Image (spheres, rainbow, N blue to C red):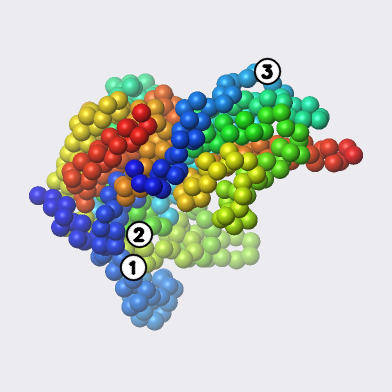
Amino acid sequence: MNDRLKALYQKVIMKHSKQPFHFEKKIPCDHIVVANNPVCGDNYNFYIDADTEKIGKIYFHGFGCAISKASNSVLATLISNQDWRDAYQYCNAFLAYLEHKDGADQKPLDPAFEAFSAVHEFPSRMDCATLGWKEVKKFVETHLKKEDIRQ
Amino acid sequence: MIDPNLIRSHFPIFQHHPDLVYFDNAATTQRPQTTIDAVSKFYSQRNANIHRGLYSLSTDATAGYESGREKVKDFIGADTVQSIAFTKGTTESINVVANSFLGPRLQPGDNVVISAMEHHSNLIPWQQICLQKKAELRVIPVDKSGELGINNIGDFLDSKTRMLAITHISNTLGTINPVERIVEIAHKNQVPVLIDAAQSICLHPINVDTLACNFLVFSSHKMFGPFGVGVLYVHPDHMEDMLPYNYGGGMVTHVDFHKSSFMAYPHNLEAGTSAIAEVFGLSSAIDYLNNIDRLEASDYVHGLAHYFKERLAEVGTAVVVGSPENCAGIVSFLLDDIHPHDVATFLAEENIAIRAGHHCTQPLLEQMGVKATLRASFSIYNTREEIDHMIAVLKKIQKFWA
C-alpha cells in the first residue's frame, strides 16, 4: 500500500471503523438526525439526547464506508455531553480543518481531528468524512437559532 | 479475433494514461480517435446550425445530421428513418415515452409493468406517471441469481397493462434478459414493450424488426460515441401517437399567438438546437462498431467477466452478487465486509477504475440483500492481464484490512 493510502486509512481510522464508539440504535431518544448521501448510499442515524443546556449522549447507527464510520465515531466521542455552543464550535472546527479553510497547516481544535488530515488529498472521499458532521452541525444550529429567538 | 491491444491503440485515453485499467464501461465507454475527430471535424470544417439555413454550410450540416439518423436506422435494423428521434440520452428517451406516449392514454386502474432490475431511469419515469394517473406500477421480481422468472412474466400482464418496460442487460448484475421471448409474451397480451438497450447497444447486435419491440432506447456515450445524445426508436405503429415533449423552435408547422401546430414525429420531439456535433460523433462511433465483429466482441467481453469471476474465487471470501446464467461483461461483487467505497479507493490508487455504490438500482440491491457493491464492467480494450492485476490488488487490500 502506498503512503497516501496509509495516511488515509491510518490506524486510528481503522480502529474507529472496526469498533465504532456508541454504535447502536439507541431508541428512545430525544432527537434523530439523519445523514444520508443519495449518491453513494451512505446512510446513518444519530440518536441524540439533549436538554436546553447541553447535548447528552450521542449514539449512531447505519451503513457506510470506513472513513464515514470512523468520522461519525469521533463525532459521537467528541460531541457527547458538550454544551450547545461548544458542540457547534467543534462541528465548525472539524469541517474547517478538513476543508483547509484556514490553510493546510492549521492546528486542529482536537487531536482526534488529525486522523482525517489526509482526506483532503482524496476529494472524492471528502463527503464520507464530513456528511455526519454537516448534518449534526445543522441540527445544533437550528437549536441555537431557536434559543436566540427565545432570548 | 478481437485483438485488445490493437483496439487499445484506437483509444487515445490509453496513450495519455498508459497504466489506466478502465473497468467502468457500464458507466461510460472510452471513445476511439475517430469519434473525437468526427466531433472536432464538424466544428472546424462544417459548423452551422441545421434545418433553417439557406447557405451551403447549413445544408451540408443538415445533410450530415440527417445521415446520422439514417445510420442509426440501419444500425438497429429499423424499417424507416422516421422511427429514429435524437434525444439527450436513454433517460430522456424513456421520459419521452412515459409522458408523450403513455401519459395521455393511461387511465386510473391501468397498470405499467417493469422489472426489479431496472436502472432508476427505467423506473422513476413510470413510477411518477403512474402516481399522477392513479395507475399501478407492477414489478417483476428477480431471484437470488439475479434473473427474472421468465415463465411468470405473463402473470403480471392483463387487459389493463399499458406498457412493459424492461432492460436488455442489467447494469448492475450483467443479466442478459431474453428480450425476444419477453416481447412475444407481452404482444400476446397486446402490451407494448420498451427495451432499455443502454447496456447492450454497444456490443450486442439488435434488430428492432426481428425483436419487434415497440420502443428501443439507448445512449451514444455507452457505445464509443459522445456524451449528450441518445436515441429513441418508435415503431411505425406508434409514431402518430408521439406528442411533443418540449416546445420551441424547429418542431412547428405554424405558430400564431394563441395556437400552434406541430411537425410529425420524430421532428416534434427535437425542439431547439440539437446536439449536432454529437450526432456526427455517434455516426462515426457506429462506423467503428460496424467495422468489428460484434458477436465476437461480446463473446470476448463475456469471457473476460467469466475469467474475472473464476479468479475472484481465489480471493478468500469475495462474493459475486447475482449469478445469472446468461451474463454480459458486468460483474457486481463484494470483498469481505469491506465497504465498496473503501475498496474502490484502494483500487483507484493502482489506476484501476471501477464503480462502487448502488449503480442507480437501489431497489434491486435491497432485493439482493446488499446496500452497495463493487462493479467491474469490461469492454473490448480490456485484457486478462488487467484482471490479473486487479486480483493481485484485491488480495493486498484484503491483507491490509485483516
Res B277 → quadrant:
bottom left
Front-lying residue, B301 or B83: B301
Count residues near mark 2 (Cα–Cα under 10 Å), then give few for <14, some for 14-19, many for 20+: many
Say which residue label 3 marks: A28
Res B323 → quadrant:
top left
Residue displayed at 62% across by 30% down: A77
The percent position of residue B314, horizontal first and vertical second, equals 22, 29
The percent position of residue B153, horizontal first and vertical second, equals 34, 25
Label 2: which secondary element = loop
Residue displayed at 31% across by 47% down: B350
Q: Is residue B45 above or below residue A125?
A: below
Q: Name the chain under label 3.
A: A
User: CA gap, disc 2 to disc 3?
Assistant: 53 Å
Front-lying residue, A117 or A56: A117
Badges 1 and 2: C-beta atoms under 8 Å apart? yes
In the image, taking residue A129 as reference, residue B40 lies left or right, namely: left
Q: Name the chain under label 2.
A: B
Q: Is residue B149 above or below residue B128?
A: above
Label 1: which secondary element = helix
Work out whether residue B241 can be spotted: no
Q: Name the chain under label 1.
A: B
Badges 2 and 3: C-beta atoms under 8 Å apart? no
**What's under tag 1, amino acid-wise?**
Val
Work out whether residue B386 can be spotted: yes
Count residues near mark 1 (Cα–Cα under 10 Å), then give few for <14, some for 14-19, many for 20+: many
Label 3: which secondary element = loop
In the image, taking residue B249 as reference, residue B29 lies left or right, namely: left
Residue displayed at 41% across by 57% down: B228
Say which residue label 2 marks: B226
Say which residue label 1 marks: B39
**What's under tag 3, amino acid-wise?**
Pro
User: CA gap, disc 3 to disc 1?
Assistant: 60 Å
